[in-house]
Image (tube, rainbow, N blue to C red):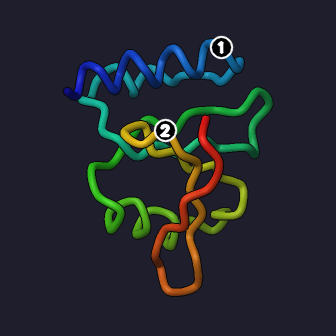
Amino acid sequence: MLERYKRRIEQYCEELGIEVPIGFHRRDACRYVAIDLGHTPPKLIATTWATEQDTARFLESSAAAQKFRLLDFQERRELTLNDQSHFVKGASF
């Protein structure tokens, strides 16, 4: 399952010109992904997360959380974090 996420994420990034850091290849890939939109080109965050709680903690600890695009590679949906630290499902990708 984890290898399937890695391939999906890499393919998605390649198609959209998103930079994949070397650190991404050193870890198993999980379903929740963040893309840093503050870089040109956008850059994948090397760490991925298995739970919404872990993903929310990362975003809450980041000073530039508004510059991230969140994706759920299991459901193939974009996500946003609401005021109660819960995810809201958005458009499919």
What residue lies at 58% left-to-right and 85% top-to-bottom? 83
Is 69 above or below relative to 7? below
Q: Residue at x 75, y 37 (%)?
A: 39
Instruction: Give the residue type that dot 1 points to.
Output: Glu
Q: Residues within 10 Å of mark 1 (few under 14, many from 20)?
A: few
User: Which amino acid, mark 2?
Assistant: Arg
Instruction: Classify residue 66 by image quadrant.
Output: bottom right
Q: Position of residue 34 (x, y in %)?
A: 53, 46
The residue under label 2 is 76
Q: What x and y, as percent, mark residue 84?
A: 50, 86
Between residue 45 and residue 83, name the one nearer to us. 83
Answer with the quarter of the image where residue 35 lies: top right
**Residue drawn at the location 35% of the way across and 22% of the way down:** 6
Residue 37: % across, % down:
73, 43
Indicate left or right for 80 with 22 as reference.
Answer: right
Q: On screen, 45 above or below 20?
A: below
Q: Nearer the viewer, residue 65 or 75?
A: 75
Q: Residue furthest bottom?
A: 84
Q: Please identify, in this view, whether the residue under mark 1 or under mark 2 is nearer the observer.
A: 2
Q: Secondary structure at mark 1?
A: helix
Residue 8 appears at what percent x and percent y?
A: 43, 20
Q: Quadrant of the N terminus?
A: top left
* Local SS, label 2: loop
Instruction: Give the alpha-carbon distance from disc 1 to disc 2, as whole Å.
Output: 15 Å
The quadrant of the image that shows the C terminus is top right
Residue that label 1 marks: 15
User: Of marks 1 and 2, which one's residue comes earlier in the chain?
Assistant: 1
Q: Relative to 14, say whether 42 is above or below.
A: below
Disc number for residue 57: none
